[in-house]
Image (cartoon, grey):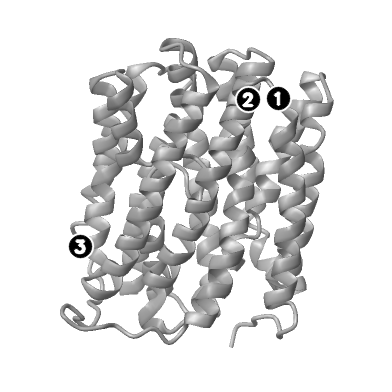
Amino acid sequence: MENARQLRLLLLFRLTRTMAAGLIAVAFPYYVLRRLHYGAFTLGMLYVAATIATAALALWFGYLADVWGRKGTLLVTGALLPLGAIVAFWSGHLAVLFAAAMLGGFSAPGARASGAAGGAGVPVQSAIIADLTTLDNRTRYFSLFTFLSGLFGAGGMLLARIVGGRDAFLAAALISGAGILLILPMKLAKPERLWGKRPGMKSLKAIGKFSVTGAVNGFSQGLIMPFLIPFFVIVYHMARQRMAVWGFLAEVLSSVALLIAPFIERRIGFVRGVAFTRGAGALLLLLLPLTRSLRLALAVYLLTPALRVVAVPAQQTALTAMVHEGETGRALGMSQVARLTASSGAIAFTGYAFGAEDIAVPFYAYAAVIAFSLMLYFRFFGARPELRPE
């Protein structure tokens, strides 16, 4: 019963962040490209800076969560998103935007469970969920959290239909700032104090496998995911109000798709689940640079984020099940930093390609990298028995 209460408070905190993140996901590229008249390369560099900062912070916060405490670390991570939004609201100067993007994590290389605005706090939240659940119900909770987060993220995207420009950052700061109050009554178990000691790592082999696949996966994410909305701004000149509606629909569809994650894990395991869903998504994305049909492009946009994220809860369960209980924060942080660091190079590449009007190349590269990543999943995890609840 007590664990359920802590999970509810964590969920409410997370929902405020994802709503703010959804608002920023739509408002930020329009603000940079349309209001301030910077190019796609500048937007890409803002994403790169935010991604690198998020990666470094995720690693540090994952370490702090294990050796200092979950609650204190969660409070610190919770403050960064509203702080970044306030800084962005304060000034549209490019140097200030870089600082804001780095603080708030306005990188959007992932979504819902694995990145987006404020992504540095994801390892801490995932470690808390792992603490408060069992292997029997963990994937279900990861799916539920990500499903509801996606719905609130969709609500934030829809909010961008009426709130744009600098006002969007003020709204995001207020929404995410309110979530910090939900952390205060939380009661989380404190880890063994390790200050001044050398905390050993018993799960380096498993962490290494997930970090390698995470890096390749992150590179593929960086190639396309942050640029799906800018793609429609640049290629189809879609208005912010209309794009907000389509972003809302894509988020809702992705959230609903996450509810089948436990079924996929039980039926075919997380490795084959990743292969089928992400492989199909990569094939669909190849259509975007090949068509000039807006309807077809929007259909692809609706489907591919859902295919991308549906296997994420099972992946999170697999990682937390394969590492030592006292190392989950660091394991999740290392996986996050590998994914985000790799994605930063891909974001820079796509920002340059979009700026040079060579828009098709990142989509072709995405399909090739996904094929390689799926080979790694089968190589690292396919030979062992699929994880089953014990």
Q: Which residue is found at the position 65% from the left and 55% from the top?
A: 310
User: Residue 287, image x and y in percent?
Assistant: 82, 33
Disc assigned to residue 72: 3
**Which element carries disc 2, helix, strand or loop?**
helix
Q: Give the label, 3 or 1, closer to the camera.
A: 1
The residue wearing badge 1 is: 358
How far apart, in angstroms, are the residues tagged by discs 3 and 1?
46 Å
> With 293 as the anchor, is 174 left or right in this view?
left
Q: Amino acid at mark 1?
A: Asp
Query: What is the C-alpha distance between the residues marked 2 and 1?
Result: 6 Å
| Depth order, front residue of 225/189 | 225
Q: Earlier in the sequence, mark 3 or mark 2?
A: 3
Which of the 4 image quadrants contains residue 199?
Answer: bottom left
Q: Position of residue 224 (x, y in %)?
A: 64, 38
Q: Secondary structure at mark 1?
A: loop
Whether residue 113 appears in this view of the structure is no
Identity, as a three-letter code, of the amino acid under mark 2: Phe
Q: Quadrant of the C terminus?
A: bottom right
Q: Looking at the picture, tell me which residue is in the foreground, 12 or 330.
A: 330
